[in-house]
């Protein structure tokens, strides 16, 4: 860390994402993220004391890479099964 960079100036991306943040990262709707969850394509994380579900950022990025690489060939550009 340089002398001019304060510790509070360093911004790290969150480790866990809300469903809306996951949707934004994947450029899809929240309902498609929910469909991915239900099909088991995108695992959810339940944090203690938090009612809503979260997604691990690394898993979301890995999922996005798999979609881009064509590994999930049964998903069209809108996230629907084909």
Image: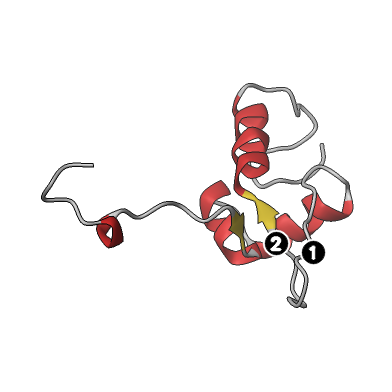
What is the quadrant of the N terminus in the image?
top left
Q: Position of residue 34 (x, y in %)?
A: 77, 60
Left or right of 32? Residue 8 is: left
Q: Between residue 24 and residue 43, name the one nearer to us.
A: 43
Q: Residue at 74% across / 73% down in the picture?
A: 52
Q: Are marks 2 and 1 in contact (CB under 8 Å)?
A: yes
Q: Where is 5 relative to 46, above or below?
A: above
Q: Residue at 30% across / 53% down in the picture?
A: 10
Q: Between residue 68 and residue 59, name the one nearer to us.
A: 59
Q: Where is 67 relative to 21, above or below?
A: above
Secondary structure beneath dot 2 equals loop
Q: Quadrant of residue 70?
A: top right
- Which of the two labelled residues, at mark 2 and mark 1, occupies the earlier sequence position? 1
Q: Residues within 10 Å of mark 2 (few under 14, many from 20)?
A: many
Q: How many marks?
A: 2
Q: Position of residue 21 (x, y in %)?
A: 55, 61
- Residue at numbered disc 1: 46
**Residue that protrudes farthest toward the left in the picture:** 4
Left or right of 14? Residue 1 is: left
Q: Quadrant of residue 2?
A: top left
Q: Residue at 77% across / 78% down in the picture?
A: 51
What is the quadrant of the C terminus in the image?
top right
> Distance between the Cα atoms at labels 2 and 1?
6 Å
Q: Position of residue 75 (x, y in %)?
A: 75, 37
Q: Where is 19 relative to 28, above or below?
A: below
- Residue at numbered disc 2: 54
């Amino acid at each position: 860390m340089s002398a001019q960079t304060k510790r509070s100036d360093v911004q790290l991306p969150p480790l866990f994402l809300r469903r809306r943040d996951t949707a934004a990262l994947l450029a899809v709707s929240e309902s498609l993220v929910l469909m991915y969850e239900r099909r088991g394509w995108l695992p959810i994380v339940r944090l203690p004391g938090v009612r809503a579900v979260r997604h691990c950022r690394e898993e979301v990025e890995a999922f996005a890479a798999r979609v881009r690489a064509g590994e999930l060939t049964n998903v069209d550009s809108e996230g629907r099964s084909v």
